Image (cartoon, rainbow, N blue to C red):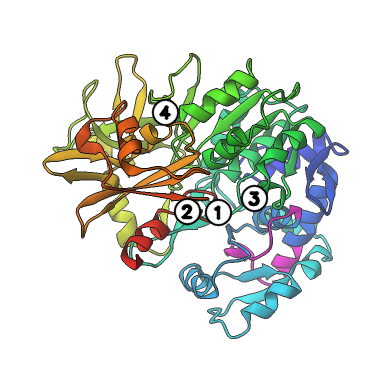
Amino acid sequence: MMMNSAVRLLDRAAARWPERPAVEDEAQRLTYREYREISQRVGGGLLQAGCGGRPVVVYLPKSVRMLTVFMGTMYAGGPYVPVDANIPLSRLEKIIDSVRPGAVVTDEAHAEKLAGLALQGSQVCLYDHLAASAVDEAALEAAVDAVVDTDPIYVMYTSGSTGTPKGVTIPHRGILDYAVWVTETFRFDESTVMANQAAFYFDNSTFDIYGSLQCGGRLLLIPETLLLYPAKLPDYLRENAVTSIFWVPTVMIAVANSGALEGAELPALKNVAFCGEVMPNTQLNIWRRNLPGRTYANLYGPTEITDVCCYYIVDRPFADADPLPIGRACENMRVVLLTEDGREAETGEQGELCVIGTGVALGYWNAPELTERAFVPNPLRPAFGERMYRTGDLAFRNEEGLLMFQGRRDSQIKLRGHRIELGEIETAAMCVAGVENACAVFDEEQQEIVLFLESKEQFLPRKFNLELRKYIPVYMLPGRITTMAALPHTANDKIDRVALRRSLKEG
């Protein structure tokens, strides 16, 4: 079977393991045969609606149904566009205006919210109607056959500096290569059970969706209410014999801080991977002490890459204050560190992390100028116009050849003549007893660093800075410290730095 489209993974899995459980949420469980049948009905309904080959916005709560719309859209030959079911309607309208979809797939409850929105000619299709459609095998096969692996599989919208969302467009080939890499790296097979935490409009979810499809494993969608009670997550993993997790550090930190890992017995768990933020060693060491013998992996990659482009299998102990490498490039990917003068950085020298390979996005949907600025010819190999994505992240290679992340270009500040990475301050803060999470921001008006701490304790700034001086120089100490019961988070469970910066102006 030629893998021109990622939906061929579902075809193959349904042929090999038709009655094996494939996907499961609180409402339903589907075997691979049922997963394919329902997805094909959705695809057939989209073809009948005239949406073949066109983007489809998926406006549903996170569920197995959402997955069948992803697959159904691919069966109809087009890319899917996942959005948050709780998205502000003004933002949804901007996404629809950008992508100009053939359809918005939703349910009756959410369809009511669309009334009065400018839908740019796209039709609203109710999920239940699509899932009841007749299947025309020949029409579906023709639609999938027309796809080539450089066509887009999905368009995922991220925030833009101007307030207009950017539609990152990933090709089928990126996902197909990524699914193989995930399966081989973590030794997935048909006994694999994955517990999905990431939202489906967040690219970390592709690890779970396509990793499980590639190996014929079982994908569980963790109930969203359970994620509010991190102390209960180890019990969920044990009760469901979960073998692999890929979570954002915020969730892993919360589980570690809850104390639930002490004495936890999770005999089935083999792989613990994390990505999306810097994982502090303080909490990672709690995981490793209580659950030794597992594969722990630090993954790195922006949305403009097919989920990740670098990885590091944690193969030795790290002190709490030590930086954790992001490792090496994934197979079929290449990472280049470019200095400000356009040459490749030497060992130990900082450069902007740029990525080349099949996982690189096609660009931003309907935004050629933005695409041209971010996806550029590789200046180191100009002879044939090789494309690279400039991440805006800074890194260096250590003596072992491992990549060491050093933060964003826009999080590097200059204060009193010193160049400072805010992430280094956060790492130091996490080493102080009682701190559960930390975020440093720069108040440009006051020209001072503000450190927000998540803790049950109230810290005296002077005393806290005395502790910080054990890890960072005096010129990096924050001018203000604010302790909160909980740091604000985005819908993707990352720390909401925008909200914290806004609080500086409002306060």
Q: Is residue 49 magenta?
A: yes
- Residue 143: within the magenta? no
Quadrant in which the C terminus appears: bottom left
Q: What kind of residue is marked 3?
A: Asp
For badge 4, the amino acid type reads Ile
Residue drawn at the location 30% of the way across and 40% of the way down:
462
Write down the residue under mark 2: 169
Q: Which residue, as the protein is rendered here, is positioned at the far right? A: 19
Q: Which residue is mark 3?
A: 145
Q: Left of 10 or right of it: where is 275?
A: left
Which residue corresponds to mark 4?
326
Q: Are marks 1 and 3 in contact (CB under 8 Å)?
A: no
CA separation in Å, label 1 and label 2: 6 Å
| Disc 2 to disc 4: CB gap under 8 Å | no
Residue displayed at 71% across by 47% down: 226
| Sequence-wise first label, 2 or 4 | 2
CB within 8 Å, label 1 to label 2: yes
Q: Which residue is mark 1?
A: 154
Q: Nearer the viewer, mark 3 or mark 2?
A: 2
Residues drawn in magenta: 44-64
* Circle 1: residue type: Tyr
Compare marks 1 and 3 and give the one earlier in the sequence.
3
Between disc 3 and disc 2, whose residue precedes? 3
Residue 210 percent coordinates (x, y): 64, 40
Q: Position of residue 219 (x, y in %)?
A: 73, 40
Residue 236's spot in the image, x, y percent?
A: 76, 37
